[in-house]
C-alpha cells in the first residue's frame, strides 16, 4: 500500500520531536506524572522570552524557507514574532497560535521543536504543500511574569513566575471582539487581516484533573461552537480535529476528550471563525507551567510527553493539509467523543 505524506510524517513525528518519551508509557496519560512526588513545579527548564527570540533568529539565519517577522509589541514593549513558511500562495495556509496565556508554555516549547525540524530536511515534503504561520509566544509579558499586579501566590519555583494574563491583567483570549490590548491588535492587524489563512489551531493548557471515560486526559479539543459560524467552516474545523484525534489518541500515551467550551465570540476559537471564515480548533494540553492553584500545575516529568504531543499535533495537521487528506477526514467521531469532566477539586480556568 502506498504511504501518503501524512502517514510518513506522522510515523516520524515523534522521532523529529527529539524529546525523550516518559517511561513507562502508561504513566504519561491520565494518572500521572503530576506534581505530587513526580517532579518539581519549576520554570527553570522553560525557555525565557530572550532565549526564544535568540532561537528564532538563529533558525531564521539557517533556514532558507523560513522568514521571521515582528508583528507588534506587548504592553511592556517586547516584540511579538511571527514565523513564516510561505512557499506558494496557491497552497492552503495554517496558523499555529501559542501562549495567549503566559502560564501555558509547553505548547511554545513544542512549536520551537517543530520549527527546528522544519529546517532539517526531514519533514517529508510538508512545506511543498502547505504554508505555515506560527506565533510562538503572543503573551510574552505574562510568560516572563513582567506584569503590573502581584504574583505572590503562584506556586512554581525558578527565576520567574508565569501568569495567564498580560501585563494589564487582561485575558487576551477574551479580547477578540474589542481588540483593546496591543497583543490582540498585533495578531489581528498584522496576521489575521494580512495573510489568507485557511486553518488555525489555538494551543492552550488546562487544569490537570480533567478526564474522559474515567481516565485523566492528556488534552482536549473543540471546534467553533458559536451559532454564527458558517456550517462549512465548522465542518472544516471538525476535520482538523479529526486529524489531531486520530494522530494523538491511539499513541498509547495520548488520551483526548472533547473540551467543554462556550460560544462567546470574544474567544479566538469562535470569534476568528466568524470574522474571517477560518476553520479553527482549540487544543487544550493537560496542566500548566505555573498557577496559584495546585491542581493546575504539573511537574517537570510531564514536560516531555506534552511537548511531544504538541509536535505531533502540528506535524500531523500540516501534513494532512499538505497532501489533501484533511478534506476526507471522517468527522463522525465527534458524535461519540465524550465531553470531558473534572475530578473533584478543580476549578474551571481553561481556554
Image: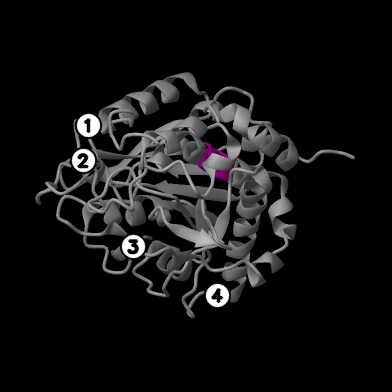
Residue 83 left/right relative to 318: left
Q: Position of residue 171 (x, y in %)?
A: 25, 59
Where the N terminus falls, by quadrant?
top right
Q: Residue furthest right?
A: 1
Distance CA(mark 1)–CA(mark 2): 7 Å
Q: Residue at x 33, y 62 (%)?
A: 345
Q: Position of residue 124 (x, y in %)?
A: 68, 31
Secondary structure under tag 2 reads loop
| Residue tagged 3 | 345
| Disc on res. 230 | 4
Q: Nearer the viewer, mark 2 or mark 3?
A: 3
The one of 113 and 185 positioned closer to us in this rendering: 113
* N-term-proximal mark, 1 vs 3: 1
Q: Are marks 1 and 2 in contact (CB under 8 Å)?
A: yes
Residue 301 left/right relative to 297: right
Q: Nearer the viewer, mark 4 or mark 2?
A: 2
Q: Nearer the viewer, mark 1 or mark 3?
A: 3
* N-term-proximal mark, 4 vs 2: 2
Residue 138 visible here: yes
Distance CA(mark 1)–CA(mark 4): 45 Å
* N-term-proximal mark, 4 vs 3: 4
* N-term-proximal mark, 1 vs 4: 1
Magenta span has 318? no
Distance CA(mark 4)–CA(mark 3): 37 Å
Disc 3 packing (10 Å; few <14; some 14–19; many ≥20): few
Disc 2 packing (10 Å; few <14; some 14–19; many ≥20): many
Disc 4 packing (10 Å; few <14; some 14–19; many ≥20): some
Q: Are marks 1 and 3 in contact (CB under 8 Å)?
A: no
| Residue tagged 2 | 161
Amino acid at each position: 500500500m502506498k504511504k501518503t505524506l501524512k502517514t510518513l510524517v506522522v510515523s516520524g513525528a515523534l522521532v523529529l520531536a527529539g524529546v525523550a518519551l516518559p517511561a513507562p508509557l502508561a504513566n504519561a496519560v491520565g494518572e500521572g506524572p503530576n506534581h505530587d512526588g513526580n517532579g518539581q513545579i519549576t520554570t527553570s527548564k522553560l525557555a525565557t522570552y530572550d532565549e526564544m527570540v535568540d532561537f528564532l533568529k538563529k533558525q531564521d539565519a539557517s533556514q532558507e524557507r523560513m522568514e521571521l517577522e515582528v508583528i507588534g509589541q506587548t504592553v511592556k514593549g517586547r516584540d511579538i514574532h511571527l514565523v513564516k513558511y510561505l512557499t506558494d500562495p496557491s497552497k492552503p495556509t495554517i496558523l499555529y497560535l501559542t501562549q495567549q496565556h503566559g502560564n501555558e508554555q509547553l505548547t511554545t516549547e513544542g512549536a520551537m521543536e517543530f520549527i527546528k525540524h522544519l529546517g532539517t530536511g526531514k519533514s517529508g515534503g510538508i512545506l511543498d504543500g502547505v504554508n505555515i504561520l506560527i506565533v510562538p509566544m503572543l503573551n510574552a509579558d505574562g510568560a516572563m511574569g513582567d506584569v503590573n499586579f502581584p504574583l505572590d501566590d503562584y506556586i512554581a519555583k525558578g527565576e520567574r513566575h508565569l501568569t495567564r494574563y498580560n501585563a494589564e491583567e487582561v485575558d487576551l483570549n477574551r479580547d477578540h471582539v474589542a481588540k483593546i490590548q496591543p497583543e490582540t491588535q498585533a495578531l489581528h492587524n498584522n496576521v489575521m487581516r494580512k495573510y489568507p489563512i485557511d486553518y488555525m489551531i489555538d494551543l492552550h493548557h488546562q487544569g490537570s484533573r480533567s478526564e474522559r471515560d474515567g481516565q485523566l486526559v492528556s488534552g482536549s479539543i473543540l471546534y467553533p461552537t458559536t451559532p454564527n459560524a458558517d456550517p462549512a467552516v465548522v465542518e472544516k474545523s471538525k476535520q482538523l480535529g479529526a486529524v489531531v484525534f486520530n494522530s494523538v489518541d491511539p499513541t498509547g500515551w495520548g488520551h483526548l476528550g472533547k473540551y467543554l467550551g462556550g460560544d462567546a465570540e470574544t474567544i479566538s476559537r469562535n470569534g476568528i471563525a466568524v470574522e474571517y471564515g477560518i476553520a479553527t480548533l482549540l487544543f487544550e494540553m493537560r496542566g500548566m507551567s505555573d498557577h496559584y492553584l495546585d491542581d493546575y500545575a504539573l511537574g517537570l516529568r510531564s514536560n516531555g510527553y506534552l511537548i511531544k504531543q504538541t509536535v505531533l499535533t502540528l506535524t500531523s495537521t500540516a501534513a494532512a493539509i499538505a497532501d489533501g487528506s484533511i478534506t476526507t477526514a471522517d468527522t463522525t467521531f465527534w458524535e461519540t467523543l465524550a465531553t470531558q469532566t473534572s475530578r473533584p477539586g478543580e476549578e474551571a480556568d481553561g481556554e
